Amino acid sequence: MEDDTETKGRIEETVRKILEESNMDEVTESKIRKQASKELAIDLSQPHFKAFVKQVVEAFLHEKHEQQQKLEEEEEEQRERGSKDKEYDDDGDLIICKLSDKRRVTIQDFRGKTLVSIREYYRKDGKDLPSSKGISLTEEQWSTFKKNVPAIEKAIKKLESRDI
């Protein structure tokens, strides 16, 4: 096959598709070139094709890096905007609501997991600190709890009606 515009277009399309579907921590330029060679039935180990594939890979990586940077900048801007009207405790956990002077519902990150904490706080050295009195729920546990709130409310009403 010739080194024409149509061939280059097909190579670029195939290489980009392979890159999009690949684990970027494991893939190498050589693996991509070999897979594209197989899919296109073209020997891409020839120097001019090899250089072209390298160019496509570098352009792809550059675009992905720029997209990631832009995304991180947008997230940072959003955090800055959002943090102006959100309250955080002395540990940096987001306070969702205060149930009383000493009880709070917070969202925290613990070892990479998001937790909903309903906890009592105590004051020490001018800081509000979480006590061991309370519970921290994983997202899955929180979801299960939320689904059961109507049943809890129904049970409360049933108990209250007995007290009358």
Image (spheres, grey):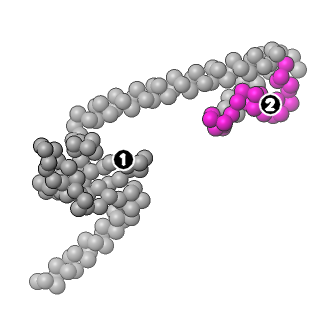
Q: Quadrant of the N terminus?
A: top right
**Label 2: few (<14), some (14–19) or many (≥20) C-alpha neighbours in 10 Å:** some
Q: Where is residue 49 in the image (x, y as percent from the top left)?
A: 80, 18
Residue found 43% across the figure and 29% down from its top: 72
The quarter of the picture where residue 28 lies is top right
Specify the segment rendered in magenta.
Answer: 21-46
Question: As shown in the figure, which amino acid type bears the numbered disc 2?
Answer: Lys
**How far apart are the two marked residues, 2 and 1, measured between alpha carbons?**
42 Å
Earlier residue among tags 2 and 1: 2
Residue 148 lies in what quarter of the image? bottom left
> Residue tagged by mark 2?
34
Question: Residue at position x 40%, y 26% from top?
Answer: 73
Q: Can residue 59 be seen in this view?
A: yes
The kind of secondary structure element at disc 1 is strand
Q: Residue at x 82, y 23 (%)?
A: 44
Q: Of discs 2 and 1, which sits in the foreground?
A: 1
Q: Is residue 36 visible?
A: no
Q: Which residue is at 15% across, 53% downward?
A: 122
Is label 2 in a helix, a strand or a loop?
Answer: helix
Please state if 133 lies on the left or on the right of 115 as rendered: left
Residue beneath disc 1: 109
Quarter containing the C terminus: bottom left
Disc 1: CA contacts within 10 A as few (<14), some (14-19) or many (>=20): few
Residue 124: x and y in percent read: 14, 48
7 versus 79 height, above or below: above
**How far across and how far down the image is residue 41, in percent?**
86, 30
